[in-house]
Amino acid sequence: MSKDNRILVTGAGGFIGGHLVKAFREDGFHIRAVDIKPFSEWYQLFVDVENLTLDLRNLDACREVTEKIAMVYNLAADMGGMGFIELNKGACMLSVLINTHLLIAAKEAGVGRFFFSSSACVYNGDKQTDSNVTALKEEDAYPALSEDGYGWEKLFSERMSRHFREDYGLVTRTARYHNVYGPHGTYKGGREKAPAAICRKVIEAKLSGRREIEIWGDGKQTRSFMYITDCVKGSRMLMESDFADPLNIGSSELVSINQLVDIVEEIAGIKLERRYNVSAPKGVNGRNSDNTLTRKVLGWEPSTSLRDGMELTYRWIYDQITANASLFSKWSWDGRTAPHADRSQVFSLDKSTHAQLEEYQL
Ligand code: NAD
Ligand code: GDC
């Protein structure tokens, strides 16, 4: 694709969207970045990019952002880890408004390609009852028995993307992400997933001297976790490919949650007493990504080891926790930097950003 063509990234203030914008920007593309959150809450904010705050549940907003756009990467969703999706099924399903309206607007605007960020939560729950799970192949989404709420919405929106392609000729690509982790993502507040949550809990135990950790479930449940750089690479490769059906983009390195805690303890250099909360949200007993089709289609699969990715994630979360404790008392407006944003990336801010940041500071 020519670099003169503009790419739209929705959910750009979030974790994966922020990393996608960073990657496209480094490659010299023109980018329009959109999120519902005020700029002060974006994980990564780049001022040489067209940044907008809009609610993409509205069709008019979707029409505005798809104007003169060649490719849409749709990462916007009301989502989180198990703690969020189990207790907010209605909110998760309302992301269907984003996906529906963005597809309609992209079709009307004659967008070239449309990427949809689906999830491993679409897979049939009956195939994930054992922690010693058989890795999930793309065909395992049917017959449908998705994760209630969030997973059903993703499956419906996958299907809608397919029918917009078949009926209206909009070229759509669908990734089924398996649990993605890394720096510049949610690590507190209730939406965080296990890798970031375990890092945060270990860091809090280390800093407070309380040598214990609460783990949701019995710790024997299994997952695979994909590092963010692999996620960005796989998403771009899928978008550029000729493959039209949903495709796994996930790591196949299976670990139990206890093993994930072992890794973080080793990085932190401590051992904690484990308390298991079996009434906390747990999700499926086991989930892994079968990458046979991904390797065939893309000639590639995620390869960052969990140990390496968690080391980088731990360091970033550690820096946030230790810096944020004093950030607001120390932070003062100097016209260049913003709390929460990656300060090394923020050079100058436009007028509306100034207004929002000043409001936020109050
Ligand atoms: P995230 O929560 O960090 O980012 C999503 C962003 O969408 C947020 O910044 C949020 O403010 C924005 N958003 C929500 N509602 C909006 C609206 N109405 N209008 C505009 N923006 C809105 O999540 P993420 O981890 O970056 O996930 C990105 C996408 O990938 C989502 O579709 C998610 O469901 C999917 N996904 C993520 C994972 C994962 O492990 N991170 C796994 C499977 C699928
Ligand atoms: O939240 P999550 O990472 O989502 O949880 C993985 C497992 O880790 C669960 O069994 C959970 O109970 C356990 N766990 C233990 N302690 C904790 O402190 C904790 N916090 C969290 N969050 N979990 C803990 C995810 C969805 C995503 C996305 C991906 C796709 O399900 O939440 O929205 O779509 O799947 O793979 P997980 O892997 O169940």
Image (tube, rainbow, N blue to C red):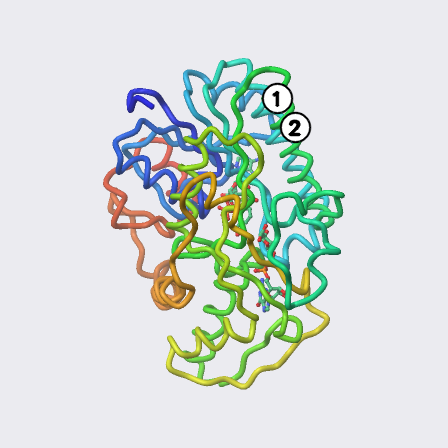
* Amino acid residing under circle 2: Met
**Disc 2 marks which residue?**
160
Q: Is residue 168 left or right of residue 337?
A: right
User: For numbered disc 2, what is the local secondary structure?
Assistant: helix
Q: Are marks 1 and 2 in contact (CB under 8 Å)?
A: yes
Q: Is residue 255 visible?
A: yes
Q: Is mark 2 within 8 Å of ligand 1?
A: no
Residue in the picture at 50% in, 27% down: 114
Q: Is residue 320 left or right of residue 80?
A: left
Quarter that holds the N terminus: top left
Q: Is residue 1 left or right of residue 105?
A: left
In this view, the residue in front, 85 or 170, is: 170
Q: Is residue 362 visible?
A: no
Residue 160, how many percent across, how many down? 65, 28
Query: How many numbered badges does the structure rendering display?
Result: 2
In this view, the residue in front, 353 or 72, is: 72
Real-space CA distance between mark 1 and mark 2, rounded to the nearest whole angstrom = 6 Å
Residue in the picture at 32% in, 35% down: 24
Q: Is residue 49 left or right of residue 211?
A: left
Residue 184, how many percent across, how many down? 40, 53
Residue 243, how many percent across, how many down? 50, 31
Where 334 sits versus 55, above or below?
below
Residue in the picture at 66% in, 31% down: 159
Q: Quadrant of residue 2?
A: top left
Q: Quadrant of residue 90?
A: top right
* Amino acid residing under circle 1: Phe
User: For numbered disc 1, what is the local secondary structure?
Assistant: helix
**Disc 1 marks which residue?**
164
Where 347 sits versus 173, above or below?
below
Crowding at label 1, few (<14), some or many (≥20) Cα neighbours within 10 Å?
Answer: some
